[in-house]
Amino acid sequence: MPEYRYQAQNDKGKIVKGKAEAADEADLQRRFHEMGLLLLEAKPVSKQIALKQLKKPKLADFCRQLGTLTKSGVTLVKALEIIANDESIGPYERQLYIKLRDRIVQGVALSNVMEELNPAFPPLLVFMIRAAETSGTLDTTCLRLADQYTNEAQLEQTAKNSLTYPKILAGLLVIVMAILFGYVLPQFEDIFSTMPELPIPTRILMGISDLVATKWYILLVVIILVVIFGKMIKKIPSVRYTIDKIKVKGKWGKLLKVIYSARFARTMCSLYSSGIPIHSCISISKSTIGNTYIEKQFEEVERQVAGGTPLSTALQTVDGFVSKLPATIKVGEETGMLGTMLESVAEDLDFYSRQALLRLTSYIEPVMVVVMAVGVGFIMIAIIQPIYQSYQSIGAGS
């Protein structure tokens, strides 16, 4: 519940000051009256919130509840109060929704409050709510947004689930290698030390084993520094641009293009169907793609569309989308059913993007198995080879 800073007067005329929690100012007034106090002044305490963007499942749940409540005739303020008092949400969301309600009570539009709370609410949500406020379709717009965020959350979860098995294999590979290098191989050190000359694979292996067994802390520091340095490097715009370009041009480019096209189509569908101007749709949709190399190309797309070029023609020059996207948009432009065609291609590409993720995983799994087999096989050969050579020497000598 929100917190209020109050001034009240008791039956003896003494002024009492303090803070108290209440559902609203009327609730605070009623509670003070029951205690025999006269409420003179009550101001909501503005709590500082460390703003961070809500995750897709949270956005979907918020939009669905807001759309359902407003569609049932509940006022916006009351709807936000109901959502804020939901026991299933966390403290951060509760503070955020209370902030929305308090600002709306002060006469500020919902879209403007969301913009003030950037980056908690993404631009797509802000623009669509603003369009809904103008057209009076807040309930249907929120329900449409709930479906979109649900689809995006399911796609992200599919990607995470698809990578679970490769991650387990990678973890097992690290554990197996650590045991072999840190414990098993040192057991052979006395045997190998009596041999006049070791094969090159064995010398390499024993050197790595010695490093892991005696200088493991150096390796740990190096790994941590590499991870930190790698994250810092990836934040540099030019480096991120190059990495994103490699993603599109690389071996997995065809699969990733389907995913990027699906994100763009879904966002364009939601925005265009809400009556937002085409140039604003393009500007917002490009930011949801998740690839700076593709986003950079939209400077030319926006220039062409502003000059009167059809969107389908402008998108044909973008390197990073499947050809089905501009082709379907062209049909929509020619038939005057762009919104319908955008929805159709968005659903198709959502399906194909899930299939693309499954195919990507099907490629990763055998690669991980081969890497594990090669690593363990190399270790076994490096151990057995000198022992086998020593037996051959003994046999030749006898």
Image (spheres, rainbow, N blue to C red):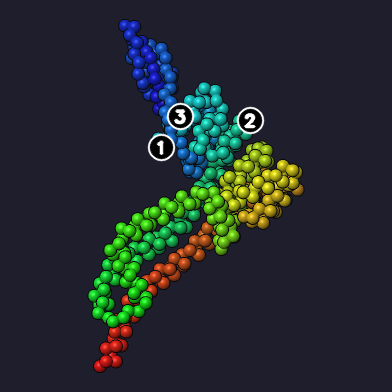
**Identity of the residue furthest to the front in this view:** 196
| Vertical relation: 350 (above or below) 178 | above
> Residue type at mark 1?
Gly
Say which element carries label 1: loop
**Residue at which label 3 appears:** 98
Image disc number at residue 340? none
Give the left or right position of residue 109, taking residue 178 as reference. right
| Vertical relation: 36 (above or below) 271 | above
* Cβ atoms under marks 1 and 2 closer than 8 Å: no
Q: Earlier in the sequence, mark 1 or mark 3?
A: 1
Residue for point 34% across, 13% down: 16
CA–CA distance in space, label 1 to label 2: 31 Å
**Residue at which label 1 appears:** 90
Of the 4 image quadrants, the one containing the C terminus is bottom left
Of the 4 image quadrants, the one containing the N terminus is top left
Say which element carries label 2: helix
| Vertical relation: 33 (above or below) 352 | above
* Along the line of sight, the residue nearer the viewer: 71 or 3: 3
Tell me where residue 108 appears, x and y as whole percent.
Answer: 55, 25
* Along the line of sight, the residue nearer the viewer: 374 or 237: 237
Image disc number at residue 134? 2
> Residue type at mark 3?
Ile
**Identity of the residue furthest to the top in this view:** 12
Tell me where residue 290 appears, x and y as whole percent.
Answer: 55, 49
* Cβ atoms under marks 3 and 2 closer than 8 Å: no
Res 270 seen here: no
Residue for point 66% across, 53% down: 318
**Identity of the residue furthest to the bottom in this view:** 398
Q: Dot 2: few (<14), some (14–19), or many (≥20) neighbours within 10 Å?
A: few
Residue for point 41% across, 51% down: 228
Say which element carries label 3: helix
